[in-house]
């Protein structure tokens, strides 16, 4: 049975206020050729509340499903060869492109996503979003054209996670990492990533550490783009 989209989304817009999150980035063995970060995505740490999911019914916002945004289609065409290149950038999402997910049944579009400066391993973000049905478990009435008339705003800080390097078993990770921007990354500090949610027989994931940033160079200077 379809649920009333206006009731569900109005309630969610009034409650969704993440208390933080993580900014992830990833490269693979194509980096020496492309000199571009392969993928960038966000996972939010949710504030605690109860809501009515249109598919599952009453749910808790802190249950093991992270509100997240996949930015691959938007950052891939950009010249992002270091996470610092995101500073001050604004990404405009396509009108009906569901690049974010709140739950299995509720996804969202992202008309605008603004990044601030990186300061003490955190980056400020401001995200405009419109909740809608997922393509698989959508149970709200109305169309995506109806749903995107309403919007919410998220303003928070994200932890900038170490860069993930996906390395084929036949290569040494340093052979890929040495091509990274040496002012941002320390390719001599690489460690096996044991907490990733994927595994393959032909490759492994590694974390590449960031260089210590000098505040006087401006990269760590705090800068806010909203009031």
Image (cartoon, rainbow, N blue to C red):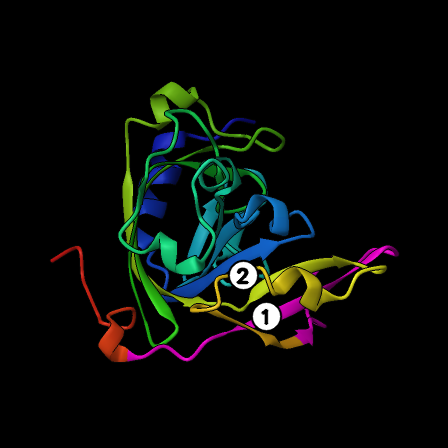
| Residue 194 shown in magenta | yes
Residue at 47 percent across and 52 percent down: it is 81
The residue lying furthest to the right in this view is 201
Residue 78 seen:
yes
Q: Position of residue 111 (x, y in %)?
A: 32, 34
Could you say whether the residue bearing mark 1 is in a helix, strand or loop? strand
Residue at 39 percent across and 73 percent down: it is 121
Residue at 47 percent across and 35 percent down: it is 77
Above or below, comparing residue 14 to residue 106 in the picture: below
Q: Say which label, 1 or 2, has the lower sequence index.
A: 2
Asked whether, in this view, residue 22 is left or right of residue 85, the answer is: right
Q: Quadrant of residue 177?
A: bottom right
Instruction: Please give the range of residues in magenta.
Output: 191-214
Above or below, comparing residue 181 to residue 93 in the picture: below
User: Which quadrant: the N terminus?
Assistant: top right
Give the crowd class for mark 1: few <14, some 14-19, many >=20 residues within 10 Å: many
Above or below, comparing residue 3 to residue 104 in the picture: above
Q: Position of residue 24 (x, y in %)?
A: 52, 59
Q: Are marks 1 and 2 in contact (CB under 8 Å)?
A: yes
Q: Which residue is mark 2?
A: 180
| Residue 41 shown in magenta | no
CA separation, marks 1 and 2?
A: 10 Å
Above or below, comparing residue 106 to residue 46 in the picture: above
Picture disc at residue 208: 1
Asked whether, in this view, residue 76 is left or right of residue 206, the answer is: left
Q: Nearer the viewer, mark 1 or mark 2?
A: 2
Q: Position of residue 190 (x, y in %)?
A: 64, 75
Could you say whether the residue bearing mark 2 is in a helix, strand or loop? loop
Q: Position of residue 103 (x, y in %)?
A: 54, 46
């Amino acid at each position: 049975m379809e649920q009333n989209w206006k009731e569900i989304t109005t309630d969610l817009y009034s409650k969704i206020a993440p208390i933080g999150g993580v900014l992830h980035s990833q490269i693979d063995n194509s980096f020496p050729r492309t000199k571009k970060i392969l993928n960038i995505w966000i996972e939010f740490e949710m504030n605690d509340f109860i809501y009515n999911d249109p598919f599952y019914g009453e749910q808790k916002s802190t249950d093991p499903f992270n509100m997240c945004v996949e930015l691959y289609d938007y950052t891939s065409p950009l010249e992002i060869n270091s996470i610092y290149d995101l500073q001050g950038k604004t990404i405009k999402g396509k009108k009906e492109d569901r690049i974010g997910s709140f739950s299995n049944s509720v996804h969202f579009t992202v008309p605008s996503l603004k990044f601030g400066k990186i300061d003490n391993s955190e980056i400020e973000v401001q995200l405009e979003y419109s909740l809608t049905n997922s393509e698989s478990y959508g149970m709200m009435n109305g169309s995506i054209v109806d749903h995107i008339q309403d919007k919410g705003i998220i303003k928070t800080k994200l932890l900038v996670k170490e860069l993930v390097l996906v390395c084929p078993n036949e290569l040494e990770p340093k052979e890929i990492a040495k091509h990274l921007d040496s002012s941002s990354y320390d390719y001599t500090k690489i460690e096996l990533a044991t907490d990733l949610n994927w595994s393959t027989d032909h490759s492994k994931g590694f974390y590449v550490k960031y260089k210590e940033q000098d505040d006087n160079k401006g990269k760590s200077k705090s800068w806010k783009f909203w009031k």
